[in-house]
Image: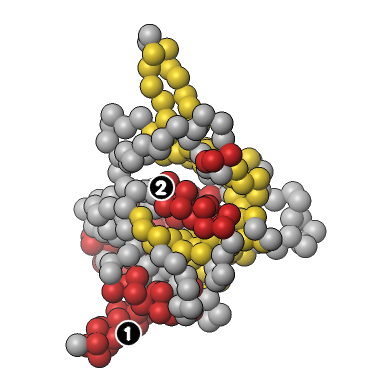
Amino acid sequence: MVCVCLRRQARLRREYIYRKSIEERERTIHEKKQKIKQSLEENKIVPVDLRKDAVYLEKTLDWDGDGADGLTTHVDDEYKWAGVEDPKIMITTARDPSSKLKQFAKEIKLLFPNSQRINRGNYEMKQLIDACRANDVTDLIMVHEHRGVPDALVVCHLPYGPTAYFTLSSVVMRHDIPDVGTMSEAYPHLIFNNFTSKLGKRVQNILKYLFPVPKEDSKRVVTFANEEDYISFRHHVYKYVDKELELKEVGPRFEMKIYQIILGTLETADTADVEWVYRPYMNTAKKRKVLSVE
């Protein structure tokens, strides 16, 4: 039975890698079709570099109408069940965590609905990932620390990726916020501000699909606000008192900064393709805003 499951996982992984490998070729063909379609609609001359294949591509345009699926990417494979099935989150830490990191992991567990926390112990990364896949976990979140202060968060989407790496700063935990009260377990509404670039949309999707679809009457709000590529995370509940809106922070709160995205899972981090990486030592690093378009 175990061998059958392993063979099935290997086959699905090969199929996913193959679809991802032909993605660029399909995108090129799709762009050529769009150029030919535009030329025909506007009664213009077909570009010289497309004339050789124009007749063949024109015959396939009928299959690319409004009812067709259109161009698909590896993102469609990664998040094809988003919004249909609730995510299932597993939260863990680096090895030998401090008491403060354990406390932070507990607060992260309260933050995400349908999440569970597991003690890292002596588990190898491959063992953790295989256990998550076997239990239909959709995302593995790992928190790291430096001298007792949480300083990094890794979001690994399963079964194939992507994996996003964030640095954390200015971390304020729930028990450090005065009069914090109890945390609602309702599915939160999400607010994303200033994620306008292509990479910004990608990061927004990675974070958005960690949460299930909320009900309209939910009084819980989670905010991701981007300011110069630093993502401010805030968590509030609200209520109306005498027709006045009262907003109360329930924590935790921290600043996040994306520094790498790989097209794979944590156990394949050394060999996976790098989708994007932060390069702070380039001459234009100070000028660039990667999550927003100015």
Quadrant (top left, top right, bottom left, bottom right) of the C terminus: top right
Q: CA distance from mark 1 to mark 2?
A: 34 Å
Q: Quadrant of residue 76?
A: bottom left
Image location of residue 272, percent across then percent down = 51, 77
Name the one closer to the observer, 289 or 223.
Answer: 223
Mark 2, other Cα within 10 Å: few <14 / some 14–19 / many ≥20: some
Image location of residue 205, percent across then percent down = 43, 52
Image location of residue 186, percent across then percent down = 32, 38
Residue at 27%, 36% (x, y): give it.
215
Q: Secondary structure at mark 2?
A: helix
Image location of residue 283, percent across then percent down = 80, 59
Residue at 25%, 54% (x, y): give it.
85
Say which residue label 2 marks. 110
Comes first in the chain, label 1 or label 2: 1
Mark 1, other Cα within 10 Å: few <14 / some 14–19 / many ≥20: few
Q: Secondary structure at mark 1?
A: helix
Say which residue label 1 marks. 10
Name the one closer to the observer, 176 or 198.
Answer: 176
In this rendering, which labeled residue sits more in front, label 1 or label 2?
Answer: 2
